[in-house]
Image (cartoon, grey):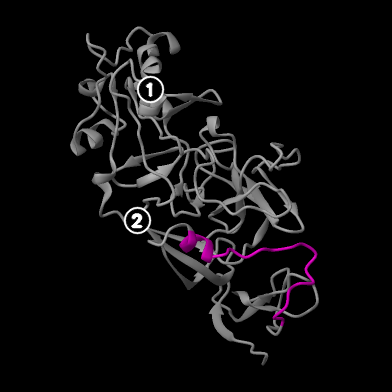
């Protein structure tokens, strides 16, 4: 490969002094040769970057770095389209990203059900609710006993026949999902159905090669926050469904509504489409040959998100504050939080697309 040094004249200070801006390349393994796929422009040489761009094998790096495998997305859901595009990350790194376009509709499991119709219905007719770190079946008995569950007699989500009040139209769905929902939807089970989102299209940008940072960045909501200037989306499941920020449970309950998740941990918003608030083990995954927990998705920084438990049912004991750790096979990666916590990961350790 030929070595190219690209320079630009730019103003670098308040006196409008011109400096020569150079394109620098990441030298992850410290061999003096730069990776042509990861670069940034700067007047002075950034730490960990060199002018050379002839290193096509960064295998000598001290730590394993694993690229996002784009084929997993299209294997999980043939409706996903994925292409590579140039992108700039939050730390200024110029690199390649995957542009992933999805209709937010999984093909590996059904969506729903969410709300049971009568207080006599069993768990198969409803979804789940997340409270205090626990996962509860939203069956008829759960709805019947909401007043005692929350120690508040305002709760009564059913009529004299035991029939549960459920939103019936798309407009009901939109109105009941409003944070300022009025009394008209008090004691309603909010159920937005797939026919409301047939025209949804979502685009996500994820770096092909993760670029780990020295300090994590926290999300605006959820454990460790509030952060700033960080995407609220935690990541993307392999089936193309978004790993969303924690559901605003306090707002939902404050309006005396219930918006259950289905057994896969997802529900529907007409603007956002179908999205997850918990990982329950029902979505497409990639098993690991060494017994490690399966790969279930990727965070917005390109690091893999794996299930919480390995094949023996054991949870990692060395996770950092973001719920991640390192091994030589998978590099740095995350393990998803327990489903009852209404959470996936706590922060990002890698640079994310601007």
Left or right, 178 with reference to 279: left
Q: Is residue 86 magenta?
A: no
User: Where does label 2 land, which residue?
Assistant: 103
- 85 up-or-down from 155: above or below: below
Say which of marks 2 and 1 sits in front: 2
Q: Quadrant of residue 319?
A: top right
Task: Give residue 94's position: percent from left, percent from top.
Answer: 56, 72
- The range drawn in magenta is 55-75
Q: Quadrant of residue 253?
A: top left
User: Where does label 1 land, which residue?
Assistant: 253
The residue lying at 33 percent from left, 47 percent from top is 273
Q: Secondary structure at mark 1?
A: helix
Left or right, 236 with reference to 195: right
* Residue 194 seen in the figure: yes
Sequence-wise, which precedes: disc 2 or disc 1? 2
Considering the whole magenta stretch, tell me its main secondary structure: loop
- 26 up-or-down from 343: above or below: below
Q: CA distance from mark 2 to mark 1?
A: 29 Å
């Amino acid at each position: 490969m030929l070595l190219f040094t690209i320079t630009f004249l730019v103003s670098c200070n308040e006196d409008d002094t011109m400096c020569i801006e150079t394109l620098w390349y990441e030298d992850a393994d410290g061999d003096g040769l730069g990776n042509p796929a990861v670069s940034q422009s700067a007047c002075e040489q950034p730490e960990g970057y060199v002018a050379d761009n002839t290193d096509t094998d960064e295998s000598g790096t001290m730590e394993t770095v694993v690229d996002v495998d784009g084929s997993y997305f299209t294997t999980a859901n043939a409706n996903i389209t994925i292409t590579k595009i140039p992108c700039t990350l939050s730390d200024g790194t110029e690199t390649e990203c995957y542009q992933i376009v999805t209709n937010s509709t999984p093909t590996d499991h059904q969506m729903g059900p969410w709300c049971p119709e009568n207080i006599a219905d069993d768990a198969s007719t409803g979804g789940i609710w997340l409270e205090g770190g626990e996962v509860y079946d939203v069956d008829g008995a759960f709805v019947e006993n909401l007043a005692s569950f929350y120690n508040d007699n305002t709760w009564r989500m059913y009529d004299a026949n035991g029939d549960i009040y459920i939103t019936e139209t798309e407009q009901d769905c939109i109105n009941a999902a409003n944070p300022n929902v009025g009394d008209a939807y008090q004691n309603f089970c909010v159920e937005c159905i797939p026919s409301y989102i047939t025209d949804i299209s979502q685009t996500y940008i994820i770096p092909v090669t993760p670029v780990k940072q020295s300090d994590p960045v926290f999300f605006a909501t959820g454990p460790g926050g509030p952060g700033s200037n960080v995407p609220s989306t935690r990541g993307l499941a392999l089936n193309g469904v978004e790993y969303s920020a924690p559901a605003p449970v306090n707002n939902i309950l404050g309006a005396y509504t219930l918006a259950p998740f289905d057994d896969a941990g997802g529900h529907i918003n007409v603007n956002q489409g179908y999205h997850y608030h918990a990982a329950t083990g029902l979505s497409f995954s990639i098993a690991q040959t060494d017994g490690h927990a399966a790969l279930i998705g990727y965070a917005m920084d390109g690091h893999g998100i794996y299930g919480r438990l390995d094949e023996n049912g054991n949870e990692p004991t060395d996770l950092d504050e973001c719920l991640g750790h390192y091994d030589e096979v998978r590099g740095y990666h995350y393990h998803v939080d327990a489903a009852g916590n209404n959470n996936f990961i706590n922060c990002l350790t890698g640079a994310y697309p601007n």
